[in-house]
Image (tube, rainbow, N blue to C red):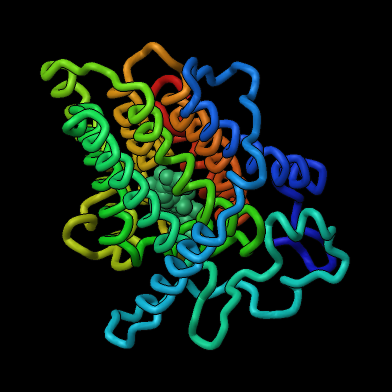
Amino acid sequence: MAPQGSRAPLEFGGPLGAAALMLLLPATMFHLLLVARSGPARLLGLPPYLPGPEALWSPWALLLWLTWLGLQAAFYLLPARKMAEGQELKDKTRLRYPINGNPIYDFFLGRELNPRICSFDCKYFCELRPGLIGWVLINLALLVQEAELRGSPSLAMWLVNGFQLLYVGDALWYEEAVLTTMDITHDGFGFMLAFGDLAWVPFTYSLQAQFLLYHPQPLELSMASVICLINAVGYCIFRGANSQKNTFRKNPSDPRVAGLETISTATGRQLLVSGWWGMVRHPNYLGDLIMALAWSLPCGVSHLLPYFYLLYFTALLVHREARDEQQCLQKYGLAWREYCRRVPYRIVPYIY
Ligand code: NDP
């Protein structure tokens, strides 16, 4: 933890990086969506013309979006739901809210860690519900549109829909696990998470399905089976690693994790050094990346565009891993260095 009076180091390149990202992210999203609809679908080509305001602005779209948010908010507020405790905040004092913030940086990262209106937690609500479920709905709409256009949805479209539905279903099934993620415990609710959850995820994560609608790809059954296998391997690593850590953090004596080797830290918490977390320091990221590859492969290899998610996600996870590493080093000090010595690879064994 930073000593009193000192400020935590700035992330994302500070205010300049934050300002650049706030311009680049929406621009990239528009670029990707327009390119996916264009004939050549060239990821690195010149951006197609932005449609006029009449094509960009529709009161119906706004109404639909507000209805979607309202519906999700109503579900979120339903009294019949399981309540779970989040992690206790380390710093309950005003030190978390230094007065001399940079407005651009603060707007990007968000100053408020857990903004709430009564019991309505704005950040937690946005993390999984409107955007993630919206992504599945957009995928489904594209599948239906393909069926209308070509008589039936293509095998590639089925695979992309199935894989991503599994991913979103998994996130919702294990919803409680989101409470220990960096987004909830460390990042404020600013542009990064609000735009990321509500716009970036539903519209750019559905890029493969959008691409397939405008650029149908033939897919052999044998190739489809290989792709399913890749997705299954990725999912097993992703789910195995996340569940192992969650089980261990909840109850280290749980028989499923009690036999694993650990390192003790000065905080009283332990770090796993065998099982999935003994293979690399972020096995869950590895599984996620393997799945990202499986989502792009049904789109063939003629275009780079459907691989945008894989490229972007690799960059995101490499950066996220570095941030997490820094935070773990601050939290666990020497014990974290010992973990890095015993588990030298970050995400990909023997490579990175
Ligand atoms: P992680 O689930 O990877 O959690 C990191 C934390 O785990 C560390 O801060 C530390 O916290 C704990 N930890 C690290 N090493 C060990 C160890 N050896 N033993 C025990 N605990 C350890 O964090 P993320 O929030 O980054 O990722 C969660 C999931 O979400 C991942 O599967 C990721 O792939 C996915 N994700 C998906 C995104 C998407 O857009 N699709 C975006 C971002 C993430 P502590 O010690 O305090 O418990």
Q: Is residue 212 visible?
A: yes
Instruction: State the image quarter where residue 174 is shown.
Output: bottom left
Q: For the view shown, which residue lies furthest in the front direction? A: 54
Q: Which of the pair 117/83 is nearer the observer?
A: 117
Name the quarter where the N terminus is drawn. Answer: bottom right
Q: Which of the pair 208/5 is nearer the observer?
A: 208
The reply, left or right, for residue 351 in relation to residue 259 is right
Q: Position of residue 28 (x, y in %)?
A: 61, 35
Q: Position of residue 333 (x, y in %)?
A: 59, 51
> Looking at the image, how many numbered discs can be counted on the residues?
0
Q: Position of residue 184 (x, y in %)?
A: 52, 63
Residue drawn at x 75%, y 57% as measured from the top left: 8
Residue drawn at x 45%, y 69% as measured from the top left: 67
The reply, left or right, for residue 100 in relation to residue 161 is right
The reply, left or right, for residue 343 in relation to residue 58 is left
Q: Position of residue 346 (x, y in %)?
A: 47, 33
Residue drawn at x 30%, y 22% as measured from the top left: 216
Q: Can residue 274 be seen in this view?
A: no
Q: For the view shown, which residue lies furthest in the top direction? A: 302
The reply, left or right, for residue 74 in relation to residue 173 is right
Q: Is residue 1 above or below residue 121?
A: above
Instruction: State the image quarter where residue 190 is shown.
Output: bottom right
